[in-house]
Amino acid sequence: MPRRPPDDPARLRIENGSWRTTPRPTDWGSRVAYVLQRDKVCQWPQGCDETEDLEVDHAEDADDHNVDHLRALCHRHHAYRTAQQAKARRPRMRRDPERHPGLRYDDDPEDAA
Ligand SMILES: [Zn+2]
């Protein structure tokens, strides 16, 4: 599926370079303030005690702006997570390795029997 061009109004570009299909809610700013006030420290699951440069992360779907599914992450962990999400979204570019014609494969019907 071809990627939509950046000027498609159905998609909004956000500051970290990821794409979302729906715009943020109009009260996004107050949701951010609420989450930062509630969490106060980076909520990285493996533990992080950073309290500076906190950013709000969508813990689940990027289009799910429910504050129960938002969390504070420090800039470093938010950037790491955003990169992981972008990597997961990218289509796999490599094809399966070619099979050696002289070898037999258990899942090849021609090799069975
Ligand atoms: Zn952190």
Image (spheres, grey):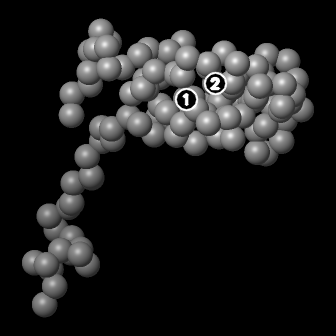
Residue, x 41% and y 37% (percent of image)?
Answer: 89
Q: Which residue is mark 2?
A: 79
Q: Which residue is mark 1?
A: 83
Q: Is residue 19 left or right of residue 43?
A: left
Which quadrant of the figure contains the N terminus?
Answer: top left
**Callout 1 secondary element:** helix
Position of residue 101 relative to residue 44, above or below, is below
Q: Which quadrant of the structure image shows residue 112?
A: bottom left
Q: Would you say the residues marked 2 and 1 are in contact, meaning their CB atoms lie under 8 Å apart?
A: yes
Label 1 amino acid?
A: Ala
Residue 107 appears anywhere in the view: yes
Which quadrant of the figure contains the C terminus?
Answer: bottom left
Badge 1: few (under 14), some or many (20 or more) residues near its Cα, within 10 Å? some
Q: Position of residue 29 (x, y in %)?
A: 66, 15
Q: Nearer the viewer, residue 108 or 87?
A: 87
Label 2 amino acid?
A: Ala
